[in-house]
Image: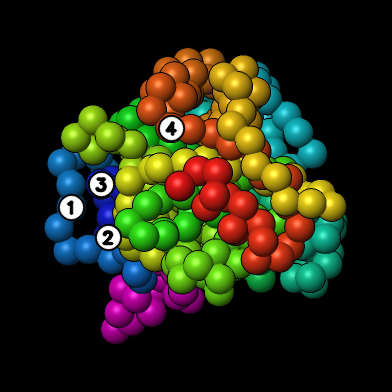
Amino acid sequence: MPLLRVADVTLDFQFPHTQPPESDADILKRRLDNQFPKFLTDAPTPPLQTHFLTCLDDIPPDTPMTDIVYEDPHLTASVHGEETHLRFSIPAVYAQQLQIALDERAYGDVYISSDWSEVRMLEYTRRHSIYTRRYRFRQAFEGFLPLHGSFVFHAAAVLWNGRGLLFTGPSGAGKTTHSGLWVSHAGASILNGDSPILSKRDGRLIIRGSPWCGTSRQSLNADAPLDAIVVLRQGDHNKMRLLPPFEASLQVLAGLRRPEWSKPHLNLALRFLDEILASTPVYELVCLPEPGAVDEAIRVAF
């Protein structure tokens, strides 16, 4: 079964009902996404750095949710002894796009071991399997990664002149548009359009690629030193400023992805936040969707 290496973690995908002679790349394209084959590897990392992801296509009976520790419109989390049980529902907009009736059990269950190293995913509606597997495996990976010193960060990651830049902000802030301007106007390349990974190597923070890249569909299996984080705001002019520590901490913490219900993960995120702020400038860029916004960022930061 496919082995992927993402940020020095081996993802061991198990698809029990996949029949040979499909290649690993074909399996990943068909069962997950065409970004995943970029991260295929033949050499697993040590056991503590292996994340086992098992997809079971058998449709099980309904499982009641008890001992709930977190709930939002699309996710319910409960803890049963040593195991965490997640139930993901499919937002109505995606259900309509995928032609799934809302009463067709348009959700799936995920069971996660106490150390987040083993994940079992149960399918209910096969027609939405690619969307749900990609999304739910990312959720599980976001819980596993902080236990080994890294975090998925919600941003567009750009490589420019040997520098790694993160453009973050709320939905609709223009991350995709702005990162595209860096490509067309400044000769940059996009490392990841939505969910890069932050890690440390030799005492320095680095940005790393991941197979999850949102609607941008842009992802590279590469890395670069982290030089700056830029919070984007739409405006009627182009102006960038260095954020003071308190404002910067709020913006960066919001971008560090982790299980919202887990206090240990919050503590890890706060420690990682301190490391980011100690070494990385955080800016706010109020901007228009034009090349002048890139010029302003280069003028102020570089």
Q: Is mark 4 on a helix, strand or loop?
A: loop
Residue pointed to by mark 4 = 280
Image coordinates for residue 302, horizontal then vertical, percent: 45, 47
Where is residue 163 drawn, in percent x and y?
37, 52
Q: Residue type at mark 2?
A: Leu
Percent across and percent down for residue 206 are: 33, 43
Three-letter code, disc 1: Pro
Give the secondary structure at mark 2: strand
Kindly check if marks 1 and 4 are in contact, taking CB atoms under 8 A apart as contact: no
| Tag 1 secondary structure | loop
- The answer to which of marks 2 and 1 sits earlier in the sequence is 2
Task: Report how far apart the C-alphas of labels 2 and 1 lie in the structure.
Answer: 7 Å
Range drawn in magenta:
17-36
Point out which mark residue 8 bears: 3
Residue under the point 62% across and 17% down: 246
Element at label 3: loop
